[in-house]
Amino acid sequence: MAEVLAATDIVEVIGASLDMKSAGPDRFVALCPFHNEKTPSFSISRGRQIYYCFGCERSGDALSFLCDHDGLTFPEALEKLANRAGVRLPAATEREDQETFQRKQVRELNAFALRQFQQMLNDPMRGGDAREYLRGRGLRTETVEAFALGYAPDGYEHFLTAARRKGYKDGVLEASGLARKGQRGGSYDFFRQRLMFPIRDAAGHVVAFGGRDLSGETEAKYINTPENAVYKKSRVLYGLYEGRTALRQAQTAILVEGYFDLLRCVDAGIPNVVAPCGTALTEEQAQILRRYVPEVTVVFDGDEAGARAALRAIAILVAAGLTVRALSLPGGQDPDDYIKAHGGAAFRELLASAQDFVTFFVGMNHARAETIEGRAAVARELFDILHGLNDALRREQYIQQAAKALGVHPWTLQQEYAKEQRRQGRRQAARETRDGEGGGDSAYKMTEDDRMFIAALLQHAHLREECEAGFERAPLPGGPVGAVLSGLFAHGPDNLSHWLEDPAARQLYGAAAAHDAIGEERAASAVRKRVLRLKKETLKAEAGRIMAAIREAEKEQDTAKVLALMKEKAGIQIEIERAGAV
């Protein structure tokens, strides 16, 4: 791994995906791909071979970028970099080799399936029913081709036979979800007599399929590929890859429910649209969407089930930091029905009039809001949505809108929200105490002192040596600072993020590596003061630990252990005095 990273230039790797601008001799900046922003805060250091975002605080090296941005597994990212750099990787362990090989086989099989299903759709003898169905739907040929729709014919072994001829084993076919094992031991096609919708990940790989029944003989109108080695439905949005450019240009996404809702929008010239893959919207999908757009309009069927689904989606999107609008279509119609009946222009007008989620939420509950108790209940339900919003200014404005819509004084609603926040905070603290999760590195908040201290060590080699010497007779501190120091002393300053297991430590290292140049005198002062303070803290903590051990040994009347511990404590005391702690 170290050889691969040493032969890799992170600027070239990230530059293949992002537009970067030079910001110094070995530093570049770009718009962050992990959150939406208008001013570049994503910093790439050629010298340190890492990236760091000052906005969302994501950091890492070339490997983690490929994993996080391209959706690759670690072995796949390592293999991609190794091939790029011409480095031969050592043989993987048997388990790693099997897992990596299976993922590769499933992806290749999905690509083959895509071609096979398209071929069946265009087959004069076999694809007639599917082509007739699409003609009835009224989709343009360009839309069908852009989304690579296909057809799985009726019968239990059409795809199996084709895949076996290509050399794919039944184990891979079953692992992909394209085939199922029968009760008598044989395999059979999972998709039969269905219109096929390829589902792609953010990098464009086909990871799954959706199938719409054309037989009319099954209750399952739509089925999707089961989750497998390459497909996790909570992490994939249908249409995201195809609409990625349109999303970034429009700076807003339209969230619809079904495949044909999305295709109808695209067909009508509205390409900035995505849909969950046969499941309710998830937090992971919302975070992925946030990389592309700052705003989402949730469009849902006008029935009760559609409204409930929309409210769940709104809460998740708001918690992800997105601006959310909502649109309920009249007469219980979905976007596919509405656009067919009224046209794309009418649908665009509705989108333009979509309400902010607060106004929409209160309007949906207008009947309940007729009573005092009802207004209180609606307000508290709205608080649950706002609780996930980590933006005080926007939250305050939403509360003011809610107060106006509910006919309540804004100050009263703000006070009630503050009370609810305190109650939730107490409940959360109680849960953390009960579960033993309070404190620790998970609660670490990076400070400018931490960042500058590590940055000074990264930039000045002699200060690193001085710092390491300073801890020769004192334990390193705990937490992310101690983890970074340990990594620095063991591996040096470059490509360190991959040696750090603690995410908080990697974040600290990334932020420090992106720090502006620190002058010699200022750096030396910062390092020496911090080392002295850390030594005092760690030595005092060690002395306290030894005193507790002495008391325990005295209870057990273990004289020899007491004497040994007292000798150890005397040595610690000498070091404390040298550090000027007394």
Image (cartoon, grey):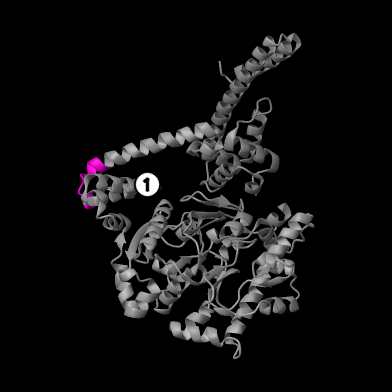
Q: Is residue 185 above or below residue 128?
A: above
Front residue of 316/450: it is: 316
Q: Residue at x 52, y 70 (%)?
A: 219
Residue 80 part of the magenta segment: no
Q: Main secondary structure of the magenta part?
A: helix
Query: How dense is the environment of label 1, judged by Cα within 10 Å: few (below 14), some, or many (20 and up)?
Result: some
Residue 122 spot, x, y in % from top left: 58, 87
Residue 199 spot, x, y in % from top left: 55, 69
Residue 1 spot, x, y in % from top left: 72, 53
Q: Residue at x 55, y 45 (%)?
A: 507
Relative side of 553 to 18, left or right: right
Q: Is residue 129 above or below residue 256?
A: below
Q: Residue at x 63, y 30 (%)?
A: 476
Front residue of 357/334: it is: 334
Front residue of 209/5: it is: 209
Describe the element under mark 1 as helix, strand or loop. Answer: helix
- Where is mark 1, residue-wise? 384
Query: If the image is split into quadrants, where does the C terminus sit?
Result: top right
Is residue 403 at least partly visible in the picture?
A: yes
Q: Residue at x 36, y 57 (%)?
A: 323
Residue 120 picture quarter: bottom right
Residue 501 spot, x, y in % from top left: 64, 44
Relative side of 412 to 457, left or right: left
- Counting labels gives 1
Q: Is residue 256 above or below residue 143?
A: above
The magenta segment is 405-413
Front residue of 3/457: it is: 3
What amino acid does circle 1 point to? Asp
Q: Residue furthest bottom?
A: 124
